Image (cartoon, rainbow, N blue to C red):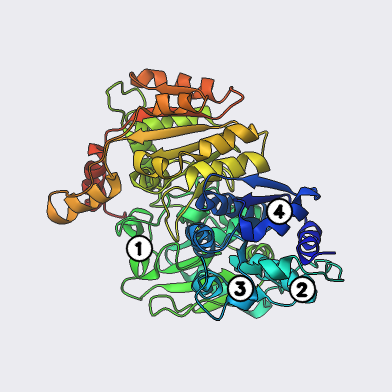
Amino acid sequence: MRAAELLVKCLEKEKVKYVFGLPGEEVLSLLDALSDSDIQFIATRHEQGAAFMANVIGRLTGKAGVCLATLGPGATNLMTGVADALLDASPLVAITGQTDLSKTHKQAHQYIDIREMFRPITKWNSRITRPEAIPEIVRWAFKVAESEKPGATHLELSEDVASSDVVGEPIEPTPVSYPAPNPESVLQAAKLIEKAAHPMIIAGNGVIRRRASAELAALAKKVHLAVTNTFQGKGCVDYNEPYALPTVGMHQRDWVMCGLERADVVITVGYDQVEYEPCLWNPEKDKKIIHIDTLPSDVDEHYLPQVEIVGEIRQSLAALAEACNFTRDYAGISSLREFLSGELNQYRQDTSMPMKPQKVLADIRQVLDKDDILLTDVGANKVWTARMFPARSPNSVLISNGFASMGFALPGAIAAKLVYPQRRVVAVAGDGGFLMVSHELETAKRLGVAFAVVVWVDNSYGLIEWKQINAFGRAYGVRITNPDFAALAKAYGLPGFKIEAAQDFQDTLRHALTLNAPSVIEVPIDYSENLRLTEKLGHLVCPV
């Protein structure tokens, strides 16, 4: 068989369902091999969209999503989504074509050293030079991508190697297990929590990755520990629970708002420092930290744990709950919960236009069920969604956070519907981010996946304008103009809606989510609320 066929057989052995990408001359053999496979090749309109789709497949399933591009510009176009997967710990395998190996020592058409370019944005990458090594290399790429902490890997397959003959068989994947927690560490942590005046939990991405939400809830309920979560940890606890505090991760006042100012012991669970820098919530380096994760902690002068419980997170949380034979109280956190609820609901009946961000999010929460999925793009919409949207279950709110890349939501929504066709999906995007990937509407239509894209329109790069005004009292270089977004959707043969009265939004969204096609809802947004929220957070005082 050809080497490309062996590689596809290896992908099949890894139970890959989709490969997202663009066709290209240097991947012709690979595409031909895919045509005889049960794996569905999904042609996207841009390689960046392909990488974001693979990224979300990995995040939702825990199995690496796969994206494909040809050499040169095809490969470089993948890089944003690949880097995003690395920093958000989403398992992803990127495959790129390359010119014949005989040309790689000199300048050649479209040739650049892609392997070297991908090195800093992947956990591991490899150039396939010997076709007989393909089974080992592919298995290694998936094992590294999916092992803690997950991330992106990359394989380069040159045109001549892909078409060469080879004899070989795929390697059977074997699961990776993590150790049980050290009992002594668990007892030390329990004693530290018992002696603490104000202990609390920061729950991160790892809680969702390791499917440990039930164990986290059991610990919080038994001991009465308040829980805040990072952007990536949204949904790891149900916001309706009495121990659930607002999300942290953006403003420096977050640590005050969520009770971290008064906390003397902080239990971090599945927390990645890229999610919310320790210097923002432990500025005086005076908090005692209990680190619970699959891997030892990174070194940071603001994050030096007194106790590390290293092992499978579910087992560690269960062991800690069993060791804690005492109960705390929730005193002092009700006002923090009330802040979130009050901020979200204060404009529930508001009819002013442009619409308030809080009103839009409150309406979306009313429409979506517990396990439906909301994806937010990067921009001011991300800050509002991460801050205010109440999540009820794991992986029900997806955010690009570590790399924070615009253009994430629409491609991600396509992948989310492929994984969970029965769930309703909403992508929230600003006008800037949406226009970076709006061409993927054609991909969504071609695939027949149905979801709603809610475009917040303010004719500006709103988050940067917000930061400029906070820093300098004025904005510069952020104003943009836009097409008619409803008409743009219709140009793709898709439903498009323009909200002209605030009271129409909720019904329009409900209707859009009954359709058998992707749709676009254009919502004029009032970002003057940005500055009001900044001022309010600045005056917020944590209760003693």
- Residue type at mark 1: give it: Arg
Q: Which residue is mark 4?
A: 31
The mark lying in front, picked from 4 and 3, is: 4
Q: Are marks 1 and 3 in contact (CB under 8 Å)?
A: no
Residue 287, percent from left and from top: 40, 72
Q: Earlier in the sequence, mark 1 or mark 3?
A: 3
Could you give the CA–CA distance between mark 1 and mark 3, rounded to whole angstroms? 44 Å
- Three-letter amino acid code at disc 2? Pro
The residue that mark 1 highlights is 262
Foreground: 369 or 333?
Answer: 369
Relative side of 522 to 151, left or right: left
- Residue 379 percent across, percent down from the top left: 35, 47
Q: Measure how far apart labels 2 and 1 are at the Cα level.
A: 59 Å
Query: Alpha-carbon distance for marks 2 and 4?
Result: 17 Å
**Label 2 environment density (alpha carbons within 10 Å; few <14, some 14–19, many ≥20):** many
Marks 4/3: CA–CA distance: 21 Å
Q: Which residue is mark 3?
A: 125
Residue at (32% x, 71% y) in the render: 283
Q: Nearer the viewer, mark 1 or mark 3?
A: 3
Q: Residue at x 50, y 28 (%)?
A: 492
Tell me the residue at 47%/19% (across/down): 507
**Nearer the N terminus, badge 4 or badge 3?**
4
- Cα separation, mark 1 vs mark 4, equals 57 Å
Q: Is residue 211 above or below residue 353?
A: below
Q: Which residue is mark 2?
A: 131
Residue neighbourhood size for the residue with mark 3, other residues' Cα within 10 Å, grouped as few (<14), some (14–19), many (≥20): many
Indicate which disc, 1 or 4, sits on the residue closer to the N terminus: 4
Residue contact between numbered discs 1 and 4, judged by CB atoms under 8 Å:
no
- Quadrant for the C terminus, please: bottom left
